[in-house]
Image: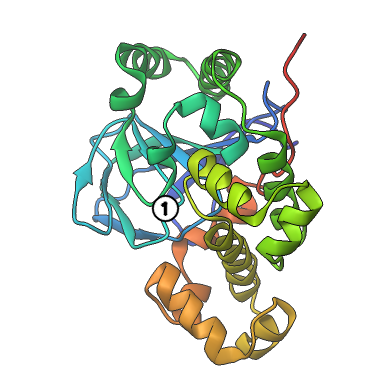
């Protein structure tokens, strides 16, 4: 892992800090963001196969979901298979990405794992306020990472783990970059298609088919951001043709592949989430 000092992202007036060592839980990744630009920052959030927590320490990061509902402070954004935007000027926040295998136990509500944006206080009660205050008082990003990691580990231990079959299905989706069929997954997991559809949906917040599409889209989006041509990305990512890719990009991100390729949200991924594989691994509880 790289050192925990902030890393200045070129061509962007912001600093990004990452942990100096792995956290307590697999399936959790964190990054700290600070932006002191005078102009309003308005960024469209690109859907990602993880549930995201935002702990806000600045003047107020405003997040708006596809329905127009706005949230500030400590919030939870689901897989956001819709159009979510973040706005602010003096931005300082800790962003935490949770694998659905962790999020199910940590958040305790599958409704928060779909395309919604919710206040963390609605899920954690007073514990959300207490953790927010501890994070604000912390003297460094490294301290913030440690505080957030410990809080997530406590809640994970107290929560309900997903079924092993659901964890298996998710891991297969990620390792195969979304190029899976539900019938094949259910057979490999030893469940009927109906049972996998029901249990996966209740614990992850998306249907298996929608989740696999999101994983495939995420893989394609990062290839587009890396400069690969749309036709090549479509051919090598499991799409029927380039038009199929175009439709999926529009459905998830509300943009064309060309616009998605230069999205600021994706531009910082190599710095904020180095080597991320979307945390597909299961989490082993301490005995």
Q: Is residue 67 left or right of residue 165?
A: left
Question: What x and y, as percent, mark residue 75?
Answer: 34, 35
Q: Is residue 65 left or right of residue 5?
A: left
- Image quadrant of residue 33? top left
Q: Is residue 240 visible?
A: yes
Q: Which residue is mark 1?
A: 13
Label 1: how many residues lie within 10 Å, few (<14), some (14-19) or many (20+)?
few
Residue drawn at x 32%, y 44% is 117
Q: Which SS class for mark 1?
A: loop
- Quarter of the figure that contains the N terminus: top right
Question: What x and y, as percent, mark residue 277?
Answer: 71, 50
Question: What x and y, as percent, mark residue 100?
Answer: 57, 40
Furthest-right residue in this view: 188
Residue drawn at x 75%, y 23% is 284
Q: Is residue 8 visible?
A: no
Residue 141 higher or lower than 66, as above or below: above
* Front-most of residues 269 and 125: 125
Question: What x and y, as percent, mark residue 99?
Answer: 60, 40
């Amino acid at each position: 892992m790289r050192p925990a000092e902030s890393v200045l992202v070129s061509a962007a007036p912001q600093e990004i800090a990452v942990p100096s060592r792995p956290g307590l839980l697999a399936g959790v990744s964190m990054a700290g963001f600070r932006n002191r630009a005078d102009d309003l920052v308005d960024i469209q959030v690109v859907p990602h196969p993880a549930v995201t927590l935002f702990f806000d320490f600045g003047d107020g990061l405003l997040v708006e979901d596809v329905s127009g509902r706005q949230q500030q402070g400590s919030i939870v954004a689901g897989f956001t298979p819709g159009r979510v935007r973040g706005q602010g000027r003096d931005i300082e926040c800790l962003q935490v990405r949770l694998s659905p295998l962790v999020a199910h136990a940590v958040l305790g509500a599958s409704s928060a794992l779909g395309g919604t944006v919710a206040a963390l206080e609605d899920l954690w009660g007073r514990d959300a306020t207490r953790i927010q205050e501890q994070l604000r008082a912390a003297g460094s990003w490294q301290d913030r990472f440690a505080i957030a990691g410990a809080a997530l580990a406590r809640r994970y231990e107290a929560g309900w783990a997903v079924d092993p079959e659901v964890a298996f299905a998710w891991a297969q989706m990620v390792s195969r970059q979304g190029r899976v069929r539900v019938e094949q997954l259910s057979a490999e997991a030893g469940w009927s298609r109906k049972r996998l559809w029901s249990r996966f949906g209740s614990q992850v917040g998306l249907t298996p088919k929608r989740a696999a599409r999101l994983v495939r889209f995420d893989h394609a989006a990062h290839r587009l951001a890396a400069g690969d041509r749309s036709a090549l990305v479509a051919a090598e990512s499991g799409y029927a043709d380039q038009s199929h890719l175009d439709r999926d990009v529009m459905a998830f991100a509300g943009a064309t592949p060309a616009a998605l390729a230069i999205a600021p949200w994706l531009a910082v991924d190599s710095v904020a989430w180095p080597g991320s594989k979307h945390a597909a691994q299961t989490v082993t509880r301490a005995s």
